[in-house]
Amino acid sequence: MKVLILGATSAIAHETAKHFAADGAELFLVGRSADKLNVVCDDLRVRGATRIETFAVNLNQLERHEEVIDAAIRALGGLDAALIAHGTLGDQQRAQADVPYMLDEFTTNAISYMALMTRLANVFEAQKRGCLAVISSVAGDRGRGSNYVYGAAKGAVSLFAQGLRNRLSKSGVVVVTIKPGFVDTPMTAHLKKNPLFAKPAPVGRRIYTAMLRGESVVYVPWFWWWIMLIIRNIPEAIFKKLSL
Amino acid sequence: MIDPGRPVRTRRYQSWGRYPQVNHTTIRSILWQNEIPDLAAFKQPILPVGYGRSYGDSCLNEGGVLLDATPLRRFLDFDEKQGLLRCEAGVMLADILDVIVPRGWFLPVSPGTKFVSVGGAIANDIHGKNHHKAGTFGCHVTRFELLRSNGERLICAPDENADLFRATIGGLGLTGLITWAEFRLRAIPGPFIAREQIRFSSIDEFFDISASSDRDYEYTVAWVDCLASGKHLGRGLFMRGNHDRLRPLPGKPIKPRPRLNVPFDLPPFVLNTLTIKAFNSLLYHAQWRKRSGKVVHYDPFFYPLDSIQNWNRMYGRQGFLQYQCVVPYHDNHHAIKEILQQIGQSGEGSFLAVLKTFGNIQSPGMLSFPRPGVTLALDFAFRGESTLRLLERLDRIVRDVCGAVYPAKDARMSAESFQAYFPQWRDFARYIDPRFSSSFWRRVTAKDCTQDTSR
């Protein structure tokens, strides 16, 4: 299997990639830091990946996306699946006061995703097969006062992916929307931990199985489906009074 | 980006025995090898920590800084031809087994749990059921990188920074932070072990079986009923095994064993002398034949307790102490008998008592625990003063025969005992990183007992 992983040094992406590596997959890893990419690359090679190439780039440079995807297809000789997993959990307080910062966060977590999804969708649509998985978030299911900048970006990703899934199902291409809850990763290192936090390893395993099975929307861990069912259905009149 | 002041709390930092319970001022996770905070900037003493499987306070640093190295969990290189593996210090032995066993390799030395880190395996110079054939884990380490608090990164190997290499193996994490390590693996024909179990009715019989097994069996260990007394003193089951050469590599992966969990602390009355006695008798009599043989997967053979998550909760909230000592061989094995007698009389021993002979393969580690002789390890539910007094009595027996107690499992030995067991501790202390310390180290070096002749 030839898999492109964007944001490959993130803990969740790395855990997912371990499973592909164990299957002997061919991987193309994209991330910001060349040093970290090398470390992740070595790890996945030991775990069994038959071929790995890396590409260091900041995916906020939208104009370089085409180059990244072309490089991946050239290096692997095609593409069977892609996982978009980069992202930042920005500072909501700062984003409320600092518009350029807010827009920057939105670019990282939404615009760059939509740009990449558009390009990858066309690749997969043309070959009439493929699996495009994107990491959204339960935060995208409802805007909350404490985290709506990140939430709005992830909401955009979820909706975009939903539409894309609808369009691509006609071509035999699968779009998987992953909605993790809290995951104990470097991105959430500054948050106080509670029992809802999941370890990245089981989250990665779930993403891997969802991609293999071609599932549509996956809450990880599963109990978030129930939590979000409740959260989504609280009437706005009550919801706006809550501090969530 | 690393902000040195930011505490990271992802789990409770306590030892496996959950005694003592201490607070740390700062917990810092080390996420990447090349993004390590400035260690000299911390005001309090520093201690690296892995998965917290040490039983006592050697993985605790009261009032200090813990560097959680578990995110350093990546492989760096695997030479499949030579059986040489290089990985980051936080890699779990379980991760390694998953990768190497299907390719025909095994850990050179395997402890009783696979949920420990490579860094911890080196820092405690762990041993396993094959000590008589392979020595300790440290015997198989070819090199590692040590980060000192002054920012120096040193490659340590038998022929490079050799002193620090020897000090760090068994060095209880005090010589600096191990970032990665390289070690030799052992080739195996497959994941199976041909196991034989032999019932023995006395300590003397244990030594006889041991002597005849250590030559032909790579792995030997015995479970002993430490609550049996009188004519049953020292009865138990002797287990020995070899990697099975008969079966080929299986075509499909083995189903993982179902994992049980102890979801909460059991109340203290569950484990009492009566229930443990009953359990031990059952276990002993479960095998009615003198010997039984079976081919088993390596997992239940090496890691029987790993199938019960959080088994330490069985001992209740007050925690437990593990006691592991080694006593050199002596005529008629009086020391080990006396220890078993003391435990039997006290009625405090528990059901997981393990007996094993150590061989004479010398570890490079300066402060390494194993030495030729017989080692006994068992748990004691923590019952306050009476438990501490019993262990102090055992210490006296061990000291009299120039034995030692395992620091990785200790939470209570006196400074006198430690310094008698490890007279080389002063030499070792020269290699400790000036910023590093642990609760254990402060306790056992609180006073210098070198002049003390009580030994």
Image: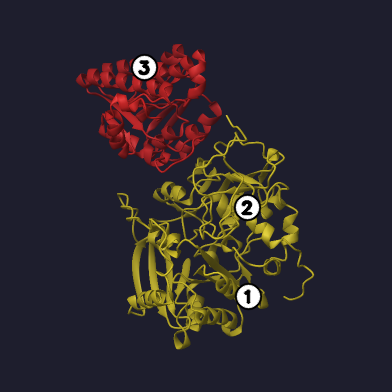
Chain colours: A red, B yellow
Q: Which of B270/B328 is in front?
A: B270
In contact (CB < 8 Å): disc 2 and disc 3:
no
Above or below, A146 relative to B58: above
Q: Secondary structure at mark 2?
A: loop
Q: Nearer the viewer, mark 2 or mark 1?
A: 2
Q: Amino acid at mark 3?
A: Met
Determine the residue positioned at 56% across, 63% down. Answer: B409
Q: Secondary structure at mark 3?
A: helix
Farthest-out residue, top: A63
Answer whether residue B8 is visible to the viewer in this image: yes
Sequence order check, earlier mark of 2 and 1: 2
In contact (CB < 8 Å): disc 2 and disc 1:
no
Say which residue label 3 marks. A114
Farthest-out residue, right: B451
Chain label for disc 3? A
Q: How far is disc 2 from disc 1 in space, using C-alphas?
A: 28 Å
Residue B164, x across and y down, in percent: 70, 50
Q: Amino acid at mark 2?
A: Glu
Q: Nearer the viewer, mark 2 or mark 3?
A: 2
Q: Amino acid at mark 1?
A: Val
Chain label for disc 2? B
Q: Residues within 10 Å of mark 1 (few under 14, many from 20)?
A: many
Are callouts 2 and 1 both on one chain? yes
Say which residue label 1 marks. B398
Chain label for disc 1? B
Determine the residue positioned at 34% across, 24% down. Answer: A79
Residue B62: numbered disc: 2
Q: Is residue B136 left or right of residue A27?
A: right
Residue B414, x across and y down, in percent: 67, 67
Q: How far is disc 2 from disc 3 in space, using C-alphas?
A: 49 Å
Q: Which of B41/A43 is in front?
A: B41
Residue B428, x across and y down, in percent: 72, 57
